């Protein structure tokens, strides 16, 4: 058994922001695998210091900390440790034992974690190969945690559970070996086969789904990143709402229909190689009325109006477009 050194725990708690100088009394901190209590002990010390600094009774901390242990014997040892830390600080034994009982739970964190939202999930998750876990339990873990693929280690599920459990702005801080970066199961989870350009997140863009029956551009104002199978269009000269109105029209659809192929079920592939073939006029060639009408049609998702304006822009008649689409 490898014991976690105190300085390592101190460092991790500092990095997570779980400090006695902060108000951790009104936060919820979770230790998912208490073990010998390396994290639990220091978390209790910092929690008690925070409580004292704020001038509040230690009883206010009843719901501030949750620690899990799988079996009753291990959980009882953790409760004894928790009570001793408190009594050593002058807390009366009945209060110390009540808090220890409230803080330490006998149970499986992976099954119980979603019962409460947390501000902090901190600890040293267990490292256990799935093949070393009873088959029935391993199957339940796999069903609950889709990141557990291939020959995954149990700590992978702890990461997923912690990230699910956190409130907005919450912090997960785990001790973890670096071998997970080279294992097979990492690749259904955090990596992408596409090059990632982080600055793209903040830029306005039109999103277009790869597989769909009609061309449906959606505006992102610079808040999200395009995932795999989601194409995007940027422009330094176009108002993207106006361009979106032009693309969502039947005229825009015509270009993809002409160059692309329909898949089984009637769906089109809106891939970059087809989207690049769409021809649009210079934005300066549009009148103010056309520009405003396309913008309004895009925002209202009004395809008939967008098509009417687009036909005027491209100077083709509805009959000509209908014949072309039928062909």
Image (spheres, rainbow, N blue to C red):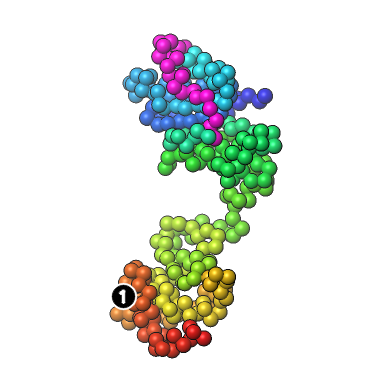
- Which residue is painted at 36% across and 85% down in the image? 312
- In the image, residue 110 above or below residue 62: below
Q: Position of residue 3 (x, y in %)?
A: 63, 24
Position in image of residue 164 (x %, y %): 49, 41
**Quadrant location of residue 301?**
bottom left
Look at the numbered disc 1 and give the secondary structure of its residue.
helix
Q: Which of these two is toward me, 170 or 187?
A: 187
Residue 243, image x and y in percent? 41, 73
Q: Is residue 132 left or right of residue 78?
A: right
Residue at 67% of width from left, 46% of height from top? 150
Quadrant (top left, top right, bottom left, bottom right) of the N terminus: top right
- Vertical placement of 80 versus 293: above or below? above
Camera-side residue: 170 or 158?
158
Q: Is residue 134 left or right of residue 22?
A: right
For residue 142, above or below residue 8: below
Label 1 packing within 10 angstroms: few (<14), some (14-19), many (20+): some
In this view of the protein, can residue 119 be seen by the observer? no
Residue 131 in view: yes
Residue lying furthest left in this view?
289
Picture residue at 34% right of the left edge, 68% below the top: 299
Q: In the figure, is residue 187 to the left or right of 98?
A: right
Question: Is residue 128 in the magenta section?
Answer: no
Residue 260 as seen in the image, left or right of residue 95: right
> Majority secondary structure of the magenta segment?
helix
The residue identified by callout 1 is 292
> Which residue is rendered at x = 63% and y = 36% of the image?
136
- x, y percentage for residue 25? 39, 27
Residue 104 lies in magenta, yes or no?
yes
Q: Which residues are magenta?
A: 87-110
- Number of numbered discs visible in the structure rendering: 1
Q: Which quadrant would residue 90 be assigned to in this image?
A: top left
């Amino acid at each position: 058994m490898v014991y976690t050194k105190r300085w390592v725990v101190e460092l991790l708690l500092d990095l997570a922001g779980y400090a006695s100088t902060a108000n951790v009394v009104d936060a919820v901190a979770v230790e998912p695998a208490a073990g010998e209590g390396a994290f639990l002990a220091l978390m209790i010390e910092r929690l008690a210091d925070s409580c004292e600094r704020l001038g509040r009774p230690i009883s206010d901390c009843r719901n501030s900390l949750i620690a899990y242990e799988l079996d009753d014997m291990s959980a009882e040892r953790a409760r004894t440790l928790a009570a001793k830390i408190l009594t050593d600080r002058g807390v009366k034994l009945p209060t110390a034992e009540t808090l220890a009982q409230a803080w330490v739970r006998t149970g499986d964190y992976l099954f119980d974690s979603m019962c409460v939202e947390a501000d902090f999930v901190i600890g040293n998750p267990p490292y256990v190969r799935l093949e070393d876990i009873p088959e029935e339990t391993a199957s339940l873990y796999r069903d609950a945690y889709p990141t557990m693929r291939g020959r995954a280690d149990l700590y992978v599920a702890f990461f997923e559970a912690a990230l699910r459990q956190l409130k907005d702005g919450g912090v997960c801080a785990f001790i973890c070996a670096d071998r997970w970066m080279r294992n097979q199961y990492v690749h259904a989870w955090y990596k992408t086969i596409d090059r990632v350009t982080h600055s793209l997140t903040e830029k306005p863009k039109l999103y277009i789904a790869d597989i769909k029956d009609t061309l449906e551009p959606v505006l992102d104002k610079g808040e999200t990143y395009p995932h795999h199978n989601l194409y995007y269009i940027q422009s330094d000269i176009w108002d993207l709402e106006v361009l979106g109105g032009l693309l969502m029209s039947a005229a825009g659809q015509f270009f993809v229909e002409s160059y692309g192929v329909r898949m089984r079920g009637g769906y089109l592939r809106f891939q970059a190689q087809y989207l690049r073939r769409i021809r649009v006029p210079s934005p300066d060639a549009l009148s103010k009325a056309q520009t405003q009408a396309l913008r309004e049609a895009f925002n209202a998702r009004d395809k008939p109006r967008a098509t009417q304006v687009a036909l005027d822009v491209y100077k083709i008649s509805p009959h000509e477009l209908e014949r072309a689409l039928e062909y």
